[in-house]
Amino acid sequence: MSDIPPSHPRYKSLVTRERLADFARQGIVTLEGLTSHGRGEAFDYLIGERTTESALLAERTAAALLLTAKHPVISVNGNAAALAAPAIAALQQASGALVEVNLFHRTEERVQKIEALLASAGCDVFSGEAEQLLDLPHDRAWCRRDGMYAADVVLVPLEDGDRCGVLVGMGKTVIAIDLNPLSRTARSATLTVVDELTRALPRITQACRELPADEQKRLIATLNNHYLLSEAICEMTGRLKDALD
């Protein structure tokens, strides 16, 4: 890591970028993943780099879905592991979900590196032989038969729209964490958390530890992803308007 002074106004952002670049050199994050992170960061600016009220509601609803699932799975890619491996481990402990690595740019070496990173952070990684089980024409089709393929609820942070749509089409409840409320992922997921990953995961974990059963039921019964996305868009457009006034 370079010598970034903590007083720098973009300290957290710069440290995160260097962390991702370091993991790219290690082969855990792809160069394409760096571009993806930059796109998300741009949307984070638009919500003020904070968790909005609608995102907080989505995070509590995500916890309710994970807690009431029979077979929840957290799908992890390189960016998610690099940014938030300890937070993923904490969420697994709080929710009881399986953690499974699934990659767009897939090699066995890269899978093993990401699994090792997650394990070092405290995750119990569900590994073993993967199969091409999803109806997709690329490496996202690979998953474990007793993992994601059998899941009823899948948390897919930093996801691609194609696989999100396929999982929903299979009858699964899909929770996406996506800063872009206009993306295919955000619009096809059952529930979209429009928040930055390292803010969202700890809040979902906290909710998993605190939510009583009656509130879990209420949150699931009132889930309206269109409302959540609309609120996120209103937040962004409102801030843009304020900036121009």
Image: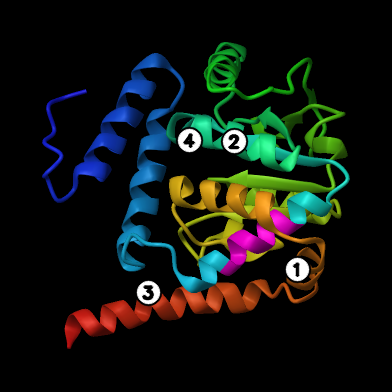
Residue tagged 4: 84
Q: Nearer the viewer, mark 1 or mark 3?
A: 1
Snapshot quadrant of residue 32: top left
Tell me whether the residue at label 4 lies in contact with that at label 3, contact meaning CB atoms closer than 8 angstroms: no
Residue hosting label 3:
236
Question: Which residue has dot 2 on it?
Answer: 90
**164 to 213, vertically: above or below:** above
User: Magenta span: helix, strand or loop, mainly?
Assistant: helix
Q: Position of residue 98 (x, y in %)?
A: 74, 33
Per the image, label 4 sits on a secondary structure element best described as helix
Q: In this image, 150 relative to 92: left or right?
A: right
| Mark 2 element type | helix
Q: Residue 24 appears in which quarter of the rendering?
A: top left
Task: Give coordinates of residue 217: x percent, y percent.
Answer: 82, 67
Identify residue type, mark 2: Ala
Q: CA distance from mark 1 to mark 4?
A: 27 Å
Badge 1 vs badge 3, beta-carbon distance below 8 Å: no
Q: Would residue 18 be found to the left or right of residue 66 on screen?
A: left
Q: Pointer 4: residues within 10 angstroms few (<14), some, or many (20+)?
A: some
**CA–CA distance between discs 1 and 3?**
29 Å
**Which residue is drawn at the image coordinates 53% and 45% (left, top)?**
158
Q: Nearer the viewer, residue 67 or 238?
A: 67
Task: Mark 4 or mark 3: name the one nearer the start of the chain.
Answer: 4
The quadrant of the rendering that contains the C terminus is bottom left
| The magenta segment | 57-64
Per the image, label 1 sits on a secondary structure element best described as helix
**Whether label 2 touches label 3, CB < 8 Å:** no
Residue 215 - label: 1
The CA distance from mark 1 to mark 2 is 22 Å
Q: How is the image coloured?
A: rainbow
At label 1, counting other C-alpha atoms closer than 10 Å, the crowd grade (few under 14, some 14-19, many 20 or more) is some
Judge the density around disc 3: few (<14), some (14-19), many (≥20) Cα neighbours within 10 Å.
some
